[in-house]
Amino acid sequence: MSQLTRRNFVRLAVASGALIAANEGFESQALAGTIRTQTGRDFSPETGTERKAIPTSCWQCVTRDSMIGFVEDGRLVKLEGNPKSIRGEGFICARGQAGINHVYDPDRILYPMKRAGARGSGKWKRISWDKALNELAGRLKKLRDQGHPEKFLFHYGRMKASSSALIKGTFLKAYGTKTIGNHTSICEGGKWSAQEMTWGGHYDNWDIDRTKFILNFGSNILETHTNHIPVAHRIMRAKVDRGVRMVTFDVRMSNTAAKSDEWMPIKPGTDQAVLLAMCNVILNKGLTKGAGADFLKFVKCTAKHDDSVATKIAALKKHCAPYTPQWAAKKSGVPASKITSLAVEFATTKPACLLTYRGAVAHYNGNEAERAAQMLAAITGNIDNPGGRCKAVGAGWKYPKGPKAPKTKGLKINDGHPDKGHPGHAAYPTHHMSHWTLKMIKDGSAGRPEVAMWYCYTPAYANGETSENIRILKDEKLLPFVVASDPFYGDSTMYTDMILPDATYLERWDCEDMVDPNQIGEYYIRQPLVKPLGEARDLGDVVCELAERMGFPLGVKSKEDFVKKACEKTPGVKEAGGFEYMKKHGVWHDPNAEPRFFSYKEVILDPKKQVCKVGGYVYTDLEDPEGICPYFGDDVLYDRQAGVWWHWRASKAKNAQEAGKKGFYSSKGAYKGYVGTKLGNIVYAGFRPDKINKSGFLELYSEPLKKKGFNPLPTWMEAPEHQKMKSNELILTTFKVCVMTHSRSTNCKWLTEIYHENRAWVNSKTASARGIKDGDKITVKSAVGSFKTKAHVTENIVTGVVAVSHHLGHWAYGRYASGNKAPLGRDDDPDLKQQFWNVYGTHPNWAIPNAPDPINGQQRWMDTVVTVRKG
Amino acid sequence: MKHALQINNEVVIELTLQRSTVYGCLARIYRKEITADFLPSIRDPQFLGVLSDLGSGLDAAWFQRPEGAVIEDLAIEYARLFLGPDKHISPHESIHHERGDGDWGSFWGASTVDVKKFIEAAGMQYREDYRDLPDHISVELEFMQKITEGERNAWEEEDTAGALYCLNMEKQFLEEHLVKWIPRFCDAITSQAKLPFYREMATITKRFIAFEKENIDAYISEAHRGKRR
């Protein structure tokens, strides 16, 4: 008999159809029921009983993937991606799947606890919620009544969307403090600041689904990223389905570099040199023609925003002239020929997408590296275009408004040191300098908080200079009262006075809004999969009660109430079915929405076409096509220097005259009144400024930087300490792996089973020069501290570098993370007996100084000069 | 939110119906002996013609003998091949599926448990009047018939996600079970059958499973492409 061909198969099917048409009834069948095709439903493979499938969202990292949690008999048994999500398309990572471990961690804190010995001694007693809240509310109310709400420091590590809107935007605002710390400067804040200096509101979404070439500087995107899985799985799809080429620059062959078509080994802190040299090549070869030149109309390249494109190109060409590929090759170790060929490939493959992340930006010159990246993308026309580096689009939730708030006050302890020239000073720390907050508290010149609260934050572990952090946290003179809202007994929580047991993210409500790679915007929620264990409570619920106790009710009873009201208020979500719809499906997006590209080209006013959009109104009956101002109203001024129409009342100016005289660039807060950017006689949406008074052009020539004495165009900077390195010194860099988040995942036993030892990567030449062999014990030492680990001697890292991941080496955080049992920790997890590992890795931050990028304040994780010795 | 289905829906529905039909027909053939109700369909010139075109060696004249004689001969052959009591070829996966853990070669083995769990986890139950073991070849083929029916329903409702759910289940069951033992089982029948009918049915079954294995990834890719459009 011949093979079954498609044609024969069809004939067989027809014949088979005749056979089974013979009516023999059900007795010829063995099975009953119907296949359940509804996705999101599942049945236990063990018992066959139905598992309740509940849509929710992850929170292991900031990506916050949409998920489905499966609950069987009240116990969470499984997490998987929500296939209805257009962001994640049903995918989540290993970290996401291990989220279950948080809920059932035997070292979870289930009751409020109060310190019963010296701070950090580990002596605690259980207290009631009533007592805990009474004490906290009493202390906070006293400060507020004394007119010093700013003496309440609230410092969070991860707080997004509705949690941020309720806790920060409503509770802390109504309380009156703006002494609020975050953690962005130890993450990627510098990248965002550099974007704010160039194209305004931060976050670049990479349109992988439409790109034809990916050039990556220092993003370990396949292992970890702020939008990890939604982007990572699109990259793999682009590579496999469309053969899209990807080239990765990294000091180390990360898994991302390994999966790229080419790994370009590069010396730490020299990404900027290569980026500048690529611009040099493209400008000299005239490859800006077409998309690049067209886009440059919207770019400020000189002091004059209305220069011709030819003048702009000439100015950039002149600026980049010293940055030859040969010059960059000496700095970076990347061959000049490779810099040239990749520059040409990037400029001639349309569209191409430029990726950057901490590998490029967590340096002394990180701000300038990101600005150079913006320049490379701009001159090739790969900005906000299909397949390029785009302005991010997310959900726009409408949250309930809180009570009328007093004028907030803040201690100036979260933005680094105010004195120019001080090592802790930065020119524009627009995402704050949380790594300098403890130093400012120690310094005391800007005042000290009397009550400090950590929420999802571990200042001792997450920042550099671990020893100093611990000393400050233990000092009751510097920090008189510290409280933590934490589900776990973490490395900093142990140095507090009171612990409020927080719900894990799988036990609480939230609206979520992370960037959508489709450029559409997806609304999604987090809902509890199980009730919080023990007496754990979501801080969102706790602040509602705290506010009530202090006499300023927030207008919502709980986080659930807040989320419900947001669902009923938010256009689109509301019409889809509001809260009930979101509880059932977890996600919503506008099915008619088109991906948003070229947002800067939106016309705000075109007198000839009779279009004018101001304040939500669209005017079409323009009587005076030459006039503009009447349609914007008297409060909107045109600033000739910036080429910007702006609403002067957003600034601190007393009147329009004063504002006009001072000008857009120099009026504090003017960016908040930005209306549009004028090109010819048309006003465009342009690149709306955020946090900084830049114009509506993409500013490669930065007026704000010029004002602070920096070169306005992206200019090579080199870390001072790198210029005077001795021959025996190395640069310490850090990295993340695909099964861990920075500091919040080592208590997840499934993950720690996989990753519990972090050896230091050292090139074989670097190692042999120090007599170090693979597996040898080594000591890494810097000016601020040292740590010990073992050497991983490899060719997959450049010479002159030692690289250590930063997830491990906890001294608390429970038995899976550190081997240490938490107070009141239970022994009811059978897997405690299965734990085969007794090593917990090392933490590199003991040796990393808290040092900011001088422009934006970003913590320089990748610049530390160290010595490495055997032993 | 349902993803808009833009691939040719009618073609997909037709294809899924055809696959379902073949699985259903084969399931019936192995399920029990040929009955008087069923025989006319086999004797139908259309059926025999198709088999002949496929290269089958079935003799149409043999089937045109008196109904009772044909049924009797086929029943004896069915019993000899699949039931015993002498040496026979047990139509159960746990006998033939050579597992890495060595747990095979007997009734109610690890494969039986796997198949039962799989089927029940998919939302199906064994009928109360079904008395044979859970991993009988007819059950496995019938299960594939049901999943492909589920897939067809999903396509008809333009529920691409649901269709993909079924397709992934089809692939998993096909690769974890059918492919692991049915080809070997069919070879045994082909070599030991005395009457052409079961020999040819075994050949067709083997060819069909191979055809399915070859094409299942393409079906899934096509569905993914439709989903992304």
Image (cartoon, coloured by chain):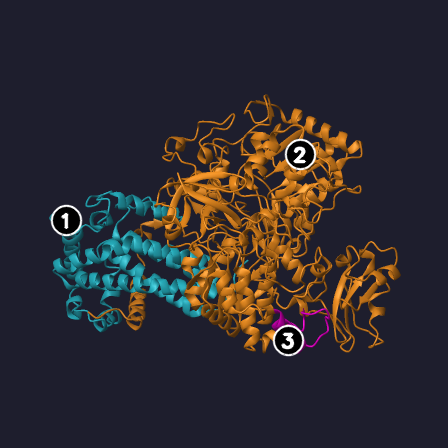
Chain colours: A orange, B cyan
How many C-alpha atoms fall within 10 Å of the one at disc 3: few (<14), some, or many (≥20)?
A: some
How many C-alpha atoms fall within 10 Å of the one at disc 2: few (<14), some, or many (≥20)?
A: many
Q: Does A145 sit above or below residue A15? A: above
Mark number for residue A452? 2
Mark number for residue A314? 3
Q: Quadrant of residue A799?
A: bottom left
Determine contact: label 2, label 3, CB under 8 Å.
Answer: no
Residue A491, given in percent of the width and then of the height, sits at: 54, 34
Q: Residue at x 48, y 32 (%)?
A: A814
Q: CA distance from mark 2 to mark 3?
A: 53 Å
Helix or strand or loop: what does disc 1 sit on?
loop
Residue highlighted by disc 1: B84
Residue A74, given in percent of the width and then of the height, sits at: 49, 36
Marks 1 and 2 share the same chain: no
Of the 4 image quadrants, the one containing the N terminus of chain B is bottom right
Q: Is residue A304 magenta?
A: yes
Q: Does A514 sit above or below residue A159? A: below
Q: Is residue A227 magenta?
A: no
Q: CA distance from mark 1 to mark 2?
A: 81 Å
Please give the range of residues in magenta.
A296-319
Residue A296, given in percent of the width and then of the height, sits at: 64, 72
How many C-alpha atoms fall within 10 Å of the one at disc 1: few (<14), some, or many (≥20)?
A: few
Callout 2: residue from which chain? A
Q: Amino acid at mark 1?
A: Gly
Q: Amino acid at mark 2?
A: Ala
Q: Residue at x 81, y 56 (%)?
A: A651
A761 and A409: which one is in front? A761
Q: Does A152 sit above or below residue B46? A: above
